[in-house]
Amino acid sequence: MTTTTTARTTIQVPAHPATPLARLRWALADTWTLTLRGINHWIRQPLPVIGGMAFMVMLVALYGFLFGGAMQVPGGGRYIEFLLPGMFVMTMAFGIGETMSAVSVDAERGVTDRFRSMPMTSSAVVMGRSITDMLYSTVGLGVMIGAGLALGWRWHGGIGETLAAFGLLLLLRFAMLWVGILLGLIVPGPGAVNAVWTVLFPLTMVTAAFAPPETMPAWLGFIAEWNPLSATIYATRDLFGNPGVGGSSFVADNATLLSVAWPLVLLGIFLPLSVHRYRNLSR
Amino acid sequence: MKERQPAVRAEGLRKRYGSTDALAGFDLVVERGAVCGLLGPNGAGKTTAVRILATLLRPNGGRAEVAGLDVVRDAGRVRQRIGLVGQAAAVDEVLSGRQNLVMFGRLFHLGTSQAKARADELLEHFALADTGRKPVKQYSGGMRRRLDLAASLILAPEVLFLDEPTTGLDPRGRNEVWASIRALVADGTTVLLTTQYLDEADQLADQVCVIDHGRVIAEGPPDELKSRIGGDRVDVVLRSAADLPVAAAIVERAAEAAVETDPDTRRVSAPVRDRMAAMSDIFAALAAANVAAEDLAVRRPTLDEVFMELTGRPAEPSTDTTDTEEAAA
């Protein structure tokens, strides 16, 4: 099959980094290489990307038009304006599924093992994943904003408040990312990802996104109110100047604080667990 | 690099999973440039041993050196000197073959242009140049395996680990992979391969380690292992299964160990010391007893028989799927 040899001599083993600076250069280079990998995935497979975003846009339109006429926003206001912050948050939460399946496909195929058997920076694998997914979600958020604007949603706050709201959304996505990485490393293969998502999916729905929790049965309203996603929903509604910020509940009163605290708590739990899990794939 | 060091040295490696010992004092020495076959049934500890040597697992005890470097303390440098081909083709299915190799080359810290040149060189070498720009999804099993192998060879590693490299391949894919491995060996790469296919070890390895219950139970060149359990064997294939008892009695007189009979293939088989004398004795005695034989042959024992002799049970795995415990590890 071959006329040439593998040419042992033409390849020089790069010098192992001796200084912290050299190690950092390797880490950054590896992270960039893996980020490029994610971008190449989108270029090679644009349909799932477009499909995923189209699905979210369709949800906005469906909820907006199906329920928009019937829903009474507490304190007044248009339903589409009430709905959109919740849809933004849901887009961020759906990121768990995207991250989880990407991580578990790599583990299943043995790609994770190949990375681990290579002289690359181990943190680059998770760093590359997080940058890729954050880029994807930022673009996804942009598409949702466009769709929202087209359907009549507007922000009424100042530029600072608006940017702060987008910042909160991306902070939430960053927390979701590490939940996804941990779950992706734990679940035994991409088949199980669907099962896990079946359990997680209702948790992304039982929030204050579509209806005020006080209109739900008490137990469900309690879950929806204390769902970490709801704090971000309340806080972004407030910052965007959208209606339905909420009445007198503790979560509604302290939404801005909680919308920062919840993601930080989740990060505090899941980031170290993910890193630990990745390092200890070598149980 | 310390030149006289063996390529792989393991001393008393131990690995526990719960209450089971995946490795229980695993010793191994593979000289530079050799091809060593780790042979054993599912769950014997082959994969665990390779994963420790490839720095993916930490042992609970013992020590191991690869390319003269400790696999635990010096894992980073070991990783620059090894290639690993695991049980699944560990390549990105969405990217093209070339994109895969460039990505892995960059992750081995080659410069961009060097990584691209190396990718093209390896695609050419593994007869993937024509399909290098197609997504891996469209590759056949054998092509994926070759790409997997190419990705493991980017830094021209001193030691290449192959964990059941042909599991799940059709005979054609298997031959393709075997040819690639032979070419590598000709280049002087040290290869440690695990397999449950005895003919694969026989085909490729010049040193075979039979592993069972987490330790090496026999070791040596395939020929030596075979002669250790009784040298040549005589096979007699009868025309009629009814003659089996008579033929078994005849063969037994010439044999130096127990005679095996197999009614399905109408075969009588036994180890013999002096092959020519045994052949002519059996031939004459069969003729005198008026037993019609279809075939009478002397052959070396198969590694199957070696394994049977060493462990008291056949090497053939009960299922052909991967052992779950090993796969999970």
Image (cartoon, helix red, strand yellow):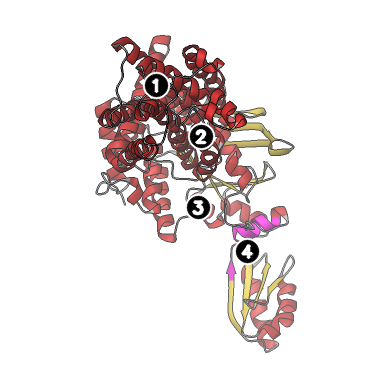
**Letter of the chain that mark 3 sits on in the rendering:** B
The residue at the point 48 percent across, 48 percent down is B165
> For the residue marked with disc 1, what is the amino acid?
Pro
Badge 1 and badge 3 in a common chain: no
> For the residue marked with disc 3, what is the amino acid?
Thr
> For the residue marked with disc 4, what is the amino acid?
Asp
For mark 4, what is the residue? B232
Q: Secondary structure at mark 1?
A: loop
**Letter of the chain that mark 1 sits on in the rendering:** A
Determine the CA span between mark 4 and mark 1. 90 Å
Mark 4 and mark 3 residues within 8 Å of each other at the beta carbon: no
Residue B97 point in image, percent of width and height? 31, 42
In magenta, the rendered stretch is: B298-309
Examine the structure image and report whether residue B297 is included in the region drawn in magenta. no
Q: Is residue B89 left or right of residue B324?
A: left
Q: Say the numbered circle drawn on residue A243.
A: 1
**Letter of the chain that mark 4 sits on in the rendering:** B
Mark 2 and mark 3 residues within 8 Å of each other at the beta carbon: no
For mark 2, what is the residue? A184
Determine the CA span between mark 1 and mark 2. 37 Å
Viewer-side residue, A121 vs B282: A121
